[in-house]
Amino acid sequence: MHLHLPAIAPRTTCATACLSLRPLAISAGVRDALAFSDPQVKAGHRHGASLTLAGTGDAIFMSAPGAGLLPAHVVVRARDLGRVLDAIESRVASGENLSLRLDIEGVRTFRSRLTPCSADMRSVRARANIAAVAQWLRAGADPLGLGVTADAVLAPGGDWLNSVIELQHDARSAESVLRRLIGLGAGTTPAGDDFSTGALAHAWVTLGREAPIAAALRSLEAALPGLTTATGATCLRAAVRGEFGSHLVAWVRALPRVSPSRALALALRVAGHGATSGFDTLAGFVAAAAATDSANCSRLQAAKARPEDHPVSSVQALV
């Protein structure tokens, strides 16, 4: 992941409200950005902390091992995370900022990335595994973070699936849909961002960076800070470069190779992220796969009816 680095950002000196830590692992983009400044702790969460870097608009997640790896992520020992969370609490009353000095010399660096493999996604096993996950999602009675159930999102001929078809049609149509999706819903990463990330993951492995949704999101990169949260914008900027959370990457890579039961087990790990973030991401990927099948079927039927191309119908309102 390439963080938005400042043009000139002298390294900060360690003030009184500063902790020194040695991470266990760090994402490649964060490692590069640390050459310019030390991270500031923005907030603590149940499972980690949010960090920022001076001169960048990106949000960095800090956690102990076991939470999966995100594109902008620092992994530390559980006791060190506890020190950070305790320091945050002690400084709430004083109003002091808390900075971190990270010793990253020799620390493991990772980059969680998908590569195009359209043939794999078209395989019988991959399609069967996606169908199994779709069935599991549609059986859930609780609404997604999008405010509707997965059954409504994945319903053939429904507004949501028609909109995902538009994401695959051309960059102009995709941008129109993304402007309504990005920032939709509550949370650190809004549900619409998570859904878009899942759809982009499917587009990335089937079409690569030339996919209409990828082209549309690249054109929206500069506007992202005004459309969504800092964390949402960070994740979307990573996704447009093919970088996703490690649990999502592991699930997608496994689809052409594993049994349906194993595919569901890996999907459960994705679903475990956030309150509904993982479910929304899975729904986006599965919807994109269903939309691809639907669009291909429509094109085949149109080709049989008459030789000229038939455009996809205009996108319907999401909300």
Image: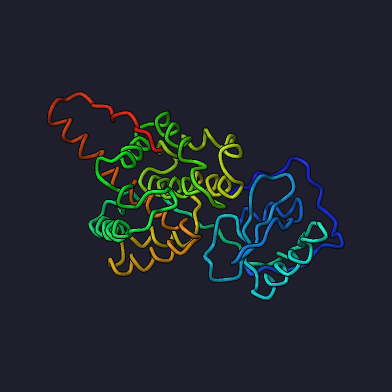
Q: Is residue 61 left or right of residue 316?
A: right
Q: How many marks?
A: 0
Q: Nearer the viewer, residue 119 or 126?
A: 126
Q: Nearer the viewer, residue 143 or 190?
A: 143
**From the viewer's perspective, is residue 68 above or below residue 283?**
below
Residue at 62% in and 59% down: 61
Measuring 27% from the left and 60% from the top, which residue is drawn there?
Answer: 132
Counting from the top left corner in percent of width and height, residue 298 is at 21, 36
Q: Residue at x 28, y 41 (%)?
A: 158
Q: Residue at x 53, y 71 (%)?
A: 66
Name the outermost residue toward the left.
305
Q: Is residue 83 left or right of residue 96?
A: left
Q: How is the image coloured?
A: rainbow
Q: Looking at this view, is 88 or 41 the one in front?
A: 88
Is 254 situated above or below 148? below
Q: Quadrant of residue 265?
A: bottom left
Quadrant, the C terminus:
top left
Q: Give the image location of residue 290, x and y in percent.
A: 28, 47
134 lies left or right of 71: left
Q: Is residue 148 left or right of residue 299?
A: right
Which corner quadrant of the image does residue 162 belong to?
Answer: top left
Whole-percent x and y of residue 65?
A: 57, 71
Is 213 drawn above or below residue 306 in the view shown?
below
Q: Position of residue 246 (x, y in %)?
A: 49, 61
